[in-house]
């Protein structure tokens, strides 16, 4: 599974925003959206304003 269209919250830091991925492969077995949300933020160190999941 993959998270796509990730909208990062960088408090207006556009330089930082451009370094963050807009797509990330989700670890195998992780299916809960809340868990995925936490994983995205923990992995990159920034909160996000949403994402989509695709297989």
Image: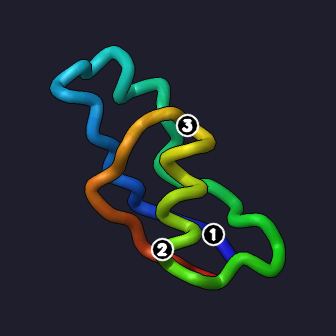
Q: Residue at x 82, y 74 (%)?
A: 28
Which marked residue is nearer to the observer: mark 3 or mark 1? 3
Q: Residue at x 52, y 41 (%)?
A: 21
- Is disc 3 surrounded by few (<14), some (14 to 19) or many (20+) residues within 10 Å? few
Residue 42 point in image, percent of width and height: 57, 44
Name which of mark 1 and mark 2 comes first in the sequence: 1
Task: State the CA–CA distance, disc 3 to disc 1.
Answer: 15 Å
Q: Residue at x 33, y 15 (%)?
A: 15
Which marked residue is nearer to the observer: mark 1 or mark 2? 2
Residue 19 placement, left or right of 7: right
Outermost residue on the top side: it is: 15
- Is disc 1 surrounded by few (<14), some (14 to 19) or many (20+) residues within 10 Å? some
Task: State the CA–CA distance, disc 2 to disc 3.
Answer: 16 Å
CB of mark 1 within 8 Å of CB of mark 2? no
- Is disc 2 surrounded by few (<14), some (14 to 19) or many (20+) residues within 10 Å? few
Q: Which residue is mark 3?
A: 44
Q: Which mark is residue 34?
A: 2
Q: Nearer the viewer, residue 43 or 16?
A: 43
Name which of mark 3 and mark 1 comes first in the sequence: 1
Q: Residue at x 50, y 33 (%)?
A: 45
Q: Which mark is residue 2?
A: 1
Name which of mark 2 and mark 3 comes first in the sequence: 2
Tag 1 secondary structure: strand
């Amino acid at each position: 599974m993959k998270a796509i269209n990730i909208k990062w919250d960088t408090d207006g830091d556009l330089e930082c925003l451009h370094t963050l991925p807009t797509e990330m492969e989700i670890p195998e077995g992780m299916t809960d959206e809340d868990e995925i949300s936490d994983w995205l933020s923990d992995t990159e160190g920034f909160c996000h304003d949403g994402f989509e999941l695709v297989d």
